[in-house]
Amino acid sequence: MSELAEVAVDTKHPAIKGEYYYIVPEPLKEKLKVGSRVKVPFNGRTVDGVVIGFLKEEEAPCDFSLKEISAVDERYVLPPFMLELAERLSKYYGAHIIDFLKLMLPPDVSLPREALYSAAEASEAESFRSKIQGEVFRVIKDAGPITSDDISKILGLPPSKVKGALSSLVKKGLVKKEFRLKIWDHYEDDKKPVFPPQLTSEQSKVLEEINQNIENEKKPVLLFGVTGSGKTEVYIRAIEKVLAKGQKALVLVPEISLTPQMTERFRSRFPGRVAVLHSRLSDGERFREWYRIYRGDADITIGARSAVFAPIRELGLIIVDEEHETSYKNMEFPFYDARQVARFRAELQGAAVLFGSATPSVESFYRAVKGEFGFLKLTRRVTGKPLPPVEIVDMREELKAGNKHIFSRKLCNEMDAALARGEQVILFLNRRGHSTFVLCRDCGYVLKCPHCDISLTYHMSDKKGKCHYCGFEVKAPDTCPNCDSRRIRYFGSGTEKVEQEIKIRYPGIGVVRVDADSTSRKGALEEMLWQFKSGKAQVMVGTQSIAKGLDFPRVSLVGIIAADVTLNLPDFRAGERTFQLISQVAGRAGRGDIPGKVIVQTYCPESLAVRAACQYRFKDFYREELINRKRFEYPPFYFLMNLIFTGVDNDKVEAAAIKVRKILEEKGLQVKILGPIPAPRFKVKDHFRYNLLLKSKDQESLIRAGDILKQLKGFDRKVLLSWDMDPQDLM
Ligand code: ADP
Ligand code: ZN
Ligand code: ZN
């Protein structure tokens, strides 16, 4: 009688995704475990899967002819708590278990291997025809098994010479060649340990409370510390404590702040013990880091959002740095929020969670005030230097005075002065590309994406109009495609435009532009940061990515070109985002010995977010924002669930949304239903999108709604329904 395995299968098509039974073939019996990654036949193809359980054939719910598992990856097995986590997430976020298991698995690459040479049995050092062969043979005899690289290092001979000698020796049968997995090597890290600074009294106090929390209560803790108050140093000390107990730590940071600067800091404090996961790793590198973590060789894992799925056993502490960052949320399927996953994971593994930020999310702030989270504060910069003064420039006044330029007169004067003094400037605009739209002055034609119904952004570097939703590109026209007029003009500025303006205004001054376009190439970000750090570039222009964590002591001026970009987003968090952005950006100025200054340009200087951020009135902002959230029934007072209906047929999509609304209403859940409304991103890649927004005071009701929706599978095959629990935006 054969045994069956229950396998979560990655079927590709969402409608048939799920768990299926497979026969365990005899040769694989010993090798298969719960958590094994397998290949299975499915609909005539071979697909990936993960074993989630075993049962006897007679226990199987039905007896149609089952297929056999084709292969198993023997290198690793997902530990039980990861399976449990996947199950929990699938309940919470509505995606399938396999959707989360996939995030937990390493890339499916074969391990890098290397050849090892050893002396064949009974082979004696005879007289060798070539001197090199003799030398190589003696090294192998003494130090083998050994790699050819190591031989060439010992002998100081070029690798090619050694390789030649080796192949002759192998041919003669004097030397054996075997392969081993490169991954088993000890991971080298040549960082010199750095001596830690003496903690300030504020830091010591906070650290003590964190350590106590790790020992005892383990409720999540929010560390609210102004920029430069030494949060990272506190993280490092808390980690030391956890490692001393034989446990491991996970540090989550926003993708973009995973700079060499940041990882260096941990590497130099914990040489050889840090694994780093980020999106710029190749598959091979990612596998290697994953495997080091899996084997327990790395004590600290640092990574962006998806590192929350790293295979860390004996986890003692999870740190979420810059916890307010939206990049912790996966905005596409499977939707998940790394901050929430971190909390689930901490519960499952008995670990503590520490959220840190200079501008906590409104939700975390509220939870901390209510006592649901521990609440710790660092109120002073380590250097004792005050936060830089922030000045608001009302751009309406600039227009009145006849300045249509993207730089206000104030900003220009300050830039002139700072650059003349040899100091550095960071300019910040939360929009990439050159111009946000291209318009014909004669007929009003606007260049749009044919698939997404939004205007194309003009990118100067390759003279193309690009769709920021779907990536569609066209060559920018010289004449109007509609009326042939030559009066085509570019409006709305992006980072490329700012860069261009700087180059015109300050010829000869080095500029780096840091945004998603300029940093897509591997190593590009590192290169630009180096340019700026070394002073080769005096101006940095970038999107919000540069607001985070950068520490450049020679920056004396920070300019926000248009605070309105975030302020005017159709989103209830627009105010929060703007507040956070201004505060974070301001923290980049005046970090060294030169005093800093910040200039914020806006058409809306009276908004709460701008005013509060510019005056560092944090409490005022949170207080007023919470009043608004309560009034309009938003988080943290209400939980949200955004149902997203998509399909190519506009009417069918809308009809499906209306139908689902009826179904949910009939169930009598304690849930408010808003919509259907066309989504703010109404048309993307030729697919229309409608949203239903569910609001509830208790999240259980929303999870129940999710259960109901799961039963609804295939209610209209032309319309895809997915949902976003705790959405970060309603796009
Ligand atoms: P945050 O993460 O809150 O922005 P950091 O931990 O990066 O702050 O600290 C800011 C700077 O101060 C860093 O250069 C760090 O090395 C330094 N620093 C942190 N704590 C101390 C301390 N106790 N004594 C001296 N320098 C410190
Ligand atoms: Zn025209
Ligand atoms: Zn598009």
Image (cartoon, rainbow, N blue to C red):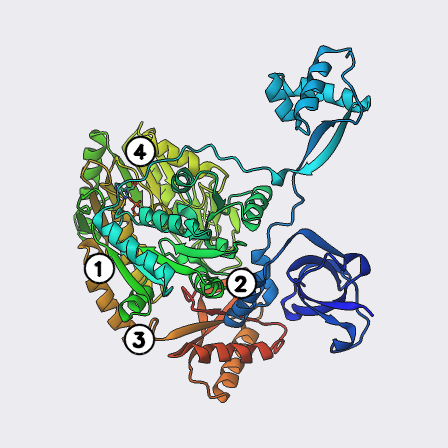
Q: Which of marks 4 and 1 is in front?
A: 1
Residue 360 in view, yes or no: no
Percent from the top left, x then y, of residue 591? 24, 40
**What residue is at 33 percent from the left and 67 percent from the top?**
572
- 535 left or right of 61? left
Q: What residue type is labelled 4?
A: Ile
Pick whichever of labels 1 and 2 is earlier in the sequence. 2
Q: Distance between the residues labelled 3 and 4?
A: 46 Å
Label whose residue precedes the other's in the sequence (2 or 3):
2
Q: Where is residue 63 in the image (x, y as percent from the top left)?
A: 80, 76
Mark with earlier residue (4, 1): 4
At a point 55% along the width and 45% down the height, the residue shown is 292
Residue beneath disc 1 = 618
Q: What element carries label 3?
A: loop
Q: Do the residues labelled 3 and 4 touch (CB within 8 Å)?
A: no
Res 82 label: none
Q: Which of marks 1 and 2 is in front?
A: 1
The residue that label 3 is drawn on is: 632
Please state which of residues 257 and 356 is positioned toward the viewer in this rendering.
Answer: 356
Depth-wise, is mark 3 or mark 1 nearer the camera? 1
In 3D space, how far apart are the residues under numbered discs 1 and 2 (Cα atoms)?
Answer: 34 Å
| Amino acid on which disc 2 is placed | Phe
